[in-house]
Image (cartoon, helix red, strand yellow):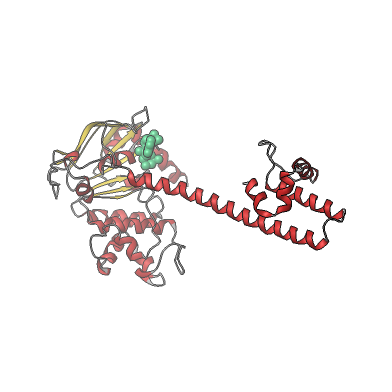
Amino acid sequence: MTTTFTMDLNTGLTQALSDGTHDYLYGAGRIAQVPLTPDTGAPDTLEYFLGALAWLTWRALNGMLSLGDVLVYFLGFQSGLNFLQGLLKALAGLYEDNLFLSNLYRFLDLQPAIQTPPNPLPVPVPLKSGLHFDEVSFSYPGRNHPALQDINIRIAPGEVIALVGENGSGKTTLVKLLCRLYDPTQGAIKADGIDLRRFDPAHWRRQVGITFQDFARYAMSVRENIWLGNPETAPDLEKVARAAERAGADEFIRDLPQGYETMLGHWFFQGQELSGGEWQKIALARNFWREANILVLDEPTSALDAIAEEKLFHAFRSVLAGRTGILISHRFSTVQMADCIYVLDGGKIIENGAHADLLAKNGQYARLYHSQAQYYQQA
Ligand SMILES: Nc1ncnc2c1ncn2[C@@H]1O[C@H](COP(=O)(O)OP(=O)(O)OP(=O)(O)O)[C@@H](O)[C@H]1O
Ligand SMILES: [Mg+2]
């Protein structure tokens, strides 16, 4: 690059480089104590510039150039330098953008690991005998330790189960297997006795509505945020409002400047930012809008206040309306309404049963429950 610069700019500098005064100019750059690039050992653009300037000054002092000539050369150098810097910046930008694009193209070329089988079976709707995790084990790719081990769970249609356990015990992983983001490494998950791998994954996923812990917040209107739960249906306002009502979101939505048409997030002009709990209610409404056969809520109340949590679970059974529910929560107030609670520890089920039975058993569940209850009692 530096060579291009010296050749393009002016004859004086080119001459200086070709007639052997280069060393002198390079030295002048060093005398000016401009930060140089010592590791390459080659003079950079700035050094040439300063060297040329020194050479011009020397010639002017010796009467070989007029002050006007020096000024013209100087301005020429400067604009050349600016141009070169701009060019380099643009090239660096192009290179950087290209890195992002190559990532995007690599992503677009990815083939899904979970494929549709040659003759997929129809998904049973509604479920008759329910869901069955049959000796399911799973390890994440590249991990030695299994995230889930020998999981056996039976969920009858219309039943609500809860999963509890410490962080990293495998609760979310179990749900990821259920919606076939991954397939079990061993064992099988069955719907009405049929292995989920026999279904078209897209058809199966339509039957599962999940609100994940890290749910999405779309910079769109409230109505669109809810409608995205199932974009195949029309965003009918009355239906959207019903889903919002079930999630306890209708009250604050009505108070927003344009109600259901209010833009959310701060990306757009007049977009309204919501609180964590309000966003969570929108995510719940999106799930309820989906009207899937199996409803999964992973930490659905983590950002909700105590009253909203109570309202949600009071209404939960009517929201389910006979469908199957899976709840994941660290809050025992939420968990105890489930028909059966499974306690996970290090990827294994260590206890299961109804709240009262598990308390009477005085095992891990009772320990976790009492350690949480103690804070309320002390307060
Ligand atoms: N994408 C992933 N790749 C590799 N390992 C993962 C991945 N996601 C989770 N794990 C590991 O799997 C184990 C179970 O994680 P999981 O997210 O299922 O726990 P969890 O019970 O939902 O925890 P939390 O209560 O914090 O939500 C953890 O050891 C975790 O580190
Ligand atoms: Mg989790």
Residue under the point 23% across and 41% down: 115
Q: In the orientation shown, which residue stands out farthest toward the bottom?
A: 258
Name the residue at the top extreme: 144
**Image quadrant where residue 192 sits:** top left
Residue at the image position 70 percent from the left and 49 percent from the top: 14
Position in image of residue 235 (x %, y %)? 27, 66
Asked whether residue 367 appears in the rendered view, the answer is: no
Q: Position of residue 56 (x, y in %)?
A: 79, 53
User: Where in the figure is residue 210, as x and y percent of width and height?
Assistant: 29, 49
- In the foreground, 77 or 336: 77
In the displayed structure, would residue 356 be above or below residue 101? above
- Depth order, front residue of 44/147: 44
How many discs appear? Answer: 0
Front residue (pair 167, 183): 183
Q: Quadrant of ligand 2?
A: top left
Q: Position of residue 265 (x, y in %)?
A: 44, 62
Quadrant in the picture for residue 155: top left
Q: Is residue 68 above or below residue 97?
A: below
Horizontally, residue 61 falls left or right of residue 321, namely: right
The answer to whether residue 177 is visible is: yes
Q: Residue furthest right?
A: 62
Q: Is residue 88 left or right of residue 190?
A: right
